[in-house]
Image (tube, rainbow, N blue to C red):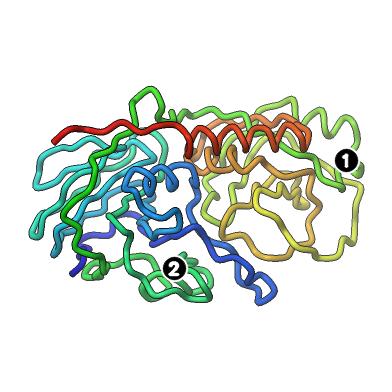
Amino acid sequence: MSLTVIHPGVLSLLQDRGRRGQQHLGLTTGGPLDATAFQHCNRLLQNPPDCTVIEISVGGLQATAQVDTFICLTGAAMSLHINGEERPSWEVQALRAGDSIRIGFAHSGCRAYLGVADGFNIKPSFGSSATVVRECIGGLHGTALCAGDRLPCATVTRRRRFYLPDADRPRYHNKLTVRVIPGYQQHHFSRQEKRNFFGKPYRVSAQCDRMGYRLEGPTIRCNLSGLLSEGICFGAIQIPPDGQPIVLLNDRQTIGGYPKIGAALSLDAARLAQLTAGATVYFTPISVHTARRALQMAEHFILARPLRERQA
């Protein structure tokens, strides 16, 4: 009993919340680039929060069902068709054995999340199903989904048909302000360098992927040299020798030796991962207290806000 992949699209990966506690082995976290859309997907389906879903980058996924279940698509604006009929995203949809699913290509944002009731039943690798292609772990076989892959899932015949009202859904634009918690190395950047970094726009480079987003704009210089490699947190903003910032994301390396001006707030790193090449990014500094408050408010919005139900 499964969903069978007919066409994987541009890039489709199985992801749960991520691989924790394994960085001492050199294994990175993985997990959904847009954690907010991932959380909404599982919550709408009434799944436990760590259930495995498919992260669809750009779009194009096609699959058929061999099982009765329910599905939900959240994240980037990609059309959802079941048996050729368009269905709304951000809403639980019934799926019957033999039904076909087709996901269109994104016209706003670039990553969507397709979940099933009770999640895909994927054997964990180092405690997680999260696929990290660079490390060849997670998912079905450590790689992106391929045509013919069978994704095991349970038969589910009853589910409440929750949906997220349009007013509560994220909006994905081509301009973003990323809030940054300055790091301990900030003092090695001059006042002028920080003024350039926080005051001028950057553009998303074509060199952006699950490891990190390289940006193009004002060159930033640091007076640190000979820095020893150290652990890298999610959202860390490295300044390599060419002076062009790199915001490190889920599949980042576990250690690195470039200086870091700070770390992007995780909420904004998720929105950054919805940008495509050419989009505009600004940075603004915030305090640890402000970051904590923003995370608390976001958690309340996702987990405490009541869902609406579509009557059958």
Q: Position of residue 227 (x, y in %)?
A: 87, 60
Total numbered labels: 2
Other residues around mark 2 within 10 Å, as few (<14) / some (14–19) / many (≥20): many
Residue at label 1? 189
Query: Looking at the picture, does residue 259 appear above or below residue 205?
Result: below
Element on which disc 1 rests: loop
Which residue occupies the foreground of this view, 294 or 27?
A: 294
Amino acid type of the residue tagged 2 in the rendering: Ser
Q: Residue at x 9, y 47 (%)?
A: 83
* Residue 84 located left or right of residue 106: left
Quadrant of the snapshot with the C terminus: top left
Q: Secondary structure at mark 2?
A: loop
Residue at 73%, 50% in the rendered image: 238
- Residue 90 x, y percent position in the rendering: 31, 37
**Residue 129 badge:** 2
> Mark 2 vs mark 1: which is more N-terminal?
2
Splitting the image into 4 quarters, where does residue 68 fall?
bottom left
- Percent across and percent down for residue 230 are 79, 63
Mark 1 is surrounded, within 10 Å at the Cα level, by few (under 14), some (14 to 19) or many (20 or more) other residues, namely some
Task: Give the foreground label among 2 and 1.
Answer: 2
Residue at 33% over, 54% down: 10
Q: Which mark is residue 96?
A: none
Image quadrant where residue 53 sits: bottom left
- Residue kind at label 1, given as amino acid type: Phe
Residue at image location 23% in from the left, 65% down from the top? 154
* 26 sits to left or right of 31: right
Most foreground residue, 185 or 191: 185
